[in-house]
Image (cartoon, rainbow, N blue to C red):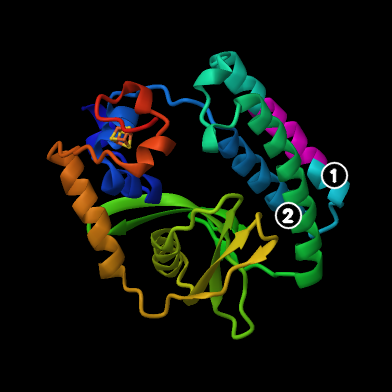
């Protein structure tokens, strides 16, 4: 099974194993090449643009941010097209032809970036500053963390750590699609408190689709033990070789369904 037994865990690994252990196995143990999806390139390019806007102190204009998105999206799509030239194998929602999906997400992503810049300029979020392991000051944008939870090493990146009026910190995740993970925000809260000694009581999502924030999620009661328990269960399951298939609705969004004999994808 190689290094999968010992490598650090993440939110996505854990949620994937919980939803369908066989998908985890195909992707991370068998290393099946996933089918490309324009939605993932849209998300990556949107994150890059939003980060650049904030790192510029909001001096980056809408046009510059949109250009950054467009350039990165094009690079990512072109790379995927070289790797999988058969657009019929790309993943799309509602059986939309992949060519249309690629074009639609290009325009949708540009609009989402434009509206993010407007939102950010109107709301002027400010972000916490922390010190990394080398003592260097880092602003709370795409911050890398690595913490031990219940004896399991967990790592990831926190999209944004905005400051609250009471000097506590919020954890924020940026989304271009509809899926939201409470477990992700819970992990960020625990990691931010553990690694940088911050106080985190709330979390939220910036939703590119709706051009604004969700209502804040109360994270004040979330404990390290609660969050750790899910990582420990997943870690033990992987080490024990438990990769149960869970065929169902999610097969339609599974990028390794082509290699799965249990698939219910249509
Ligand atoms: S196709 Fe369905 S059952 Fe198979 S790995 Fe994907 S989600 Fe799991």
Could you tell me which residue is drawn at 45 percent across and 50 percent down?
156
Residue drawn at 66 percent across, 55 percent down: 208
Look at the image and say whether residue 75 sits in the magenta stretch. Answer: yes
Residue at point 21%, 55% (across, down): 232
Can residue 180 be seen by looking at this rendering?
A: yes
Q: Position of residue 7 (x, y in %)?
A: 30, 39
Helix, strand or loop at disc 1?
helix
Q: Secondary structure at mark 2?
A: helix
Does 127 sit above or below residue 6?
below
* Disc 2: which residue: 55
- Specify the quadrant that holds the N terminus: top left
Figure quadrant of the C terminus: top left
Q: Position of residue 47 (x, y in %)?
A: 64, 47
Along the viewing direction, whichever of 106 and 155 lies nearer the viewer: 106
Q: Quadrant of ligand 1?
A: top left
Binning the other alpha carbons within 10 Å of mark 2 as few (below 14), some (14 to 19) or many (20 upward) gives some
Residue sitting nearer the eye, 197 or 235: 235
Vertical order, 177 against 41 (above or below): below
- Kindly check if marks 1 and 2 are in contact, taking CB atoms under 8 A apart as contact: no
């Amino acid at each position: 099974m190689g290094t999968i037994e010992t490598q650090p865990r993440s939110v996505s690994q854990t949620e994937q194993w919980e939803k369908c252990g066989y998908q985890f196995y195909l992707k991370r143990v068998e290393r099946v090449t996933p089918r490309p999806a324009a939605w993932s390139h849209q998300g990556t390019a949107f994150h890059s643009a939003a980060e650049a806007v904030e790192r510029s102190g909001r001096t980056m204009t809408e046009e510059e941010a949109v250009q950054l998105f467009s350039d990165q999206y094009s690079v990512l799509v072109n790379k995927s097209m070289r790797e999988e030239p058969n657009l019929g194998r790309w993943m799309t929602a509602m059986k939309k032809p992949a060519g249309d999906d690629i074009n639609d997400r290009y325009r949708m992503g540009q609009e989402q970036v434009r509206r993010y810049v407007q939102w950010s300029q109107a709301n002027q979020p400010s972000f916490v500053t922390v010190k990394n392991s080398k003592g260097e000051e880092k602003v709370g944008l795409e911050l890398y963390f690595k913490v031990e939870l219940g004896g399991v090493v967990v790592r990831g990146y926190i999209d944004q750590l905005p400051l609250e009026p009471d000097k506590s910190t919020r954890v924020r995740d940026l989304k271009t699609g509809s899926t939201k993970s409470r477990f992700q925000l819970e992990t960020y809260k625990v990691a931010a408190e553990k690694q940088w000694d911050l106080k985190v009581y709330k979390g939220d999502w910036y939703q590119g689709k709706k051009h604004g924030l969700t209502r804040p999620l109360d994270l004040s009661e979330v404990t390290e033990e609660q969050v750790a328990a899910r990582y420990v269960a997943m870690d033990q399951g992987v080490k024990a070789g438990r990769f149960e298939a869970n065929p169902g609705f999610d097969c339609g969004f599974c990028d390794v369904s082509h290699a799965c004999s249990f698939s219910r994808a249509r």
